[in-house]
Amino acid sequence: MLSSHSAANVWLWSHAGAWRDQEGAPYSTLVPSDEVTINYRHGLPVITLTLPTRSERCQFTVKPVVTTVGAFLQDVQREDKGIERMEVFATDGSKVSDGTLMEVLLMNDFKLVINNTAYSVSPPVKDKLSSEHATEMEDIKSLVHRLFVALHLEDHQVRKERELLQKLDHLKEELLPLEQMKDRIMDSADVKTSRLLWVGLALMSTQGGALAWLTWWVYSWDIMEPVTYFITYGSAMAFYAYFVLTKQDYIYPDAKDRQFLHYFYRKSKTQHFNVERYNKLKEDLAEAEESLRRLRQPLHLRLPIQEINDKD
């Protein structure tokens, strides 16, 4: 009797696959050795599959809230270098992107393609938590988050402050030669602009003197009056032409700044001064200084205002 009972057990195990589709089969929970299965262990899904190169069953524990599909596929390919193609498809045939979270993937059935073999995967259905349990879980998550922040906030601030200070030093080192070159170019442009203003004043003085000499010593006012009229009209035309070309009124400070910029950019081109790179470095420097200022705010450091001022 004992030997026949043992033989029956061996027969049942060897034919378990044939009983799989029969209702109430005692070994219907057995799965083929090459099937992809998903089980939950300690609250985390464990994906078991067969590595094609070594023909070994391997388990992969994933964190569904953090792990993406791409990260899971990379872990499998890192475990078996012989896998050349590995993709995930939905049941309708559409490809699942690598950026999809595993939590979303495990909500429905999907197909896992390894090289030229496709596996139909049916994740187990997790029991939904009641509203009371869900609220408790959210409270626990919030508490853990607050504990983590309280324990690591100071280290994070110190590390972030060190990174910002290093970034500031690096930006200032890059800006130093550019600042020196910019100062030289600005001095040269300012000298040329001032010289042009003095030349304009000299020409206007010469024009006034010439008109006075022609009016009182050479000709009479009756002859010079039309001349002065056309000179005034010509000046008005020149101002209007300036407005047409620049879309700005001829205001002396604006005209001076415009001429200064003209000399500055022309000198920058000859001196090979990269204005765009300089502006980009200045923007990065201002952004880093603002980030450092916000990081050193009293509310972030939990210090009174006078203490933070003393620290600075």
Image: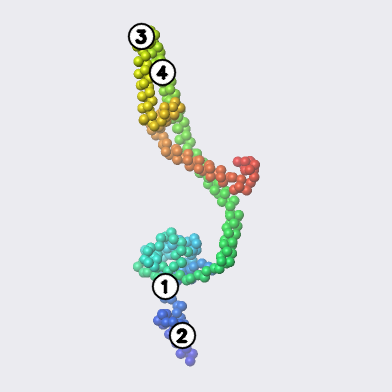
The residue lying furthest to the top in this view is 217
Q: Quadrant of the C terminus?
A: top right
Residue at the (36%, 13%) spot, across then down: 224
Q: Is mark 1 on a helix, strand or loop?
A: loop
Location of residue 242 by image quarter: top left
Of 139 and 41, nearer the camera is 139
Residue at the (39%, 68%) spot, across then down: 91
Q: What residue type is labelled 2?
A: Asn
- Residue 206 placement (x, y as % from top left): 40, 15
Give the foreground label among 2 and 3.
Answer: 3
Q: What element carries label 2?
A: helix
Identify residue for label 1: 35
Tell me how far mark 2 sits from mark 1, CA to CA: 23 Å
Tell me how far mark 2 sits from mark 3, CA to CA: 137 Å
The first of marks 4 and 3 along the sequence is 4
Give the foreground label among 2 and 1.
Answer: 1
In this view of the protein, can residue 266 be seen by the observer?
no
Tell me how far mark 3 sits from mark 1, CA to CA: 114 Å
The first of marks 4 and 1 along the sequence is 1
Tell me how far mark 4 sits from mark 1, CA to CA: 96 Å
Q: Residues within 10 Å of mark 4 (few under 14, many from 20)?
A: few
The first of marks 3 and 1 along the sequence is 1
Contact? badges 2 and 3 (CB < 8 Å): no
- Residue 225 placement (x, y as % from top left): 37, 14
Of 222 and 111, nearer the camera is 222
Identify residue for label 4: 204
- Residue 158 placement (x, y as % from top left): 57, 48
Identify residue for label 2: 9
- Residue 262 placement (x, y as % from top left): 40, 30
Of 105 and 185, nearer the camera is 105
Q: What residue type is labelled 1?
A: Glu
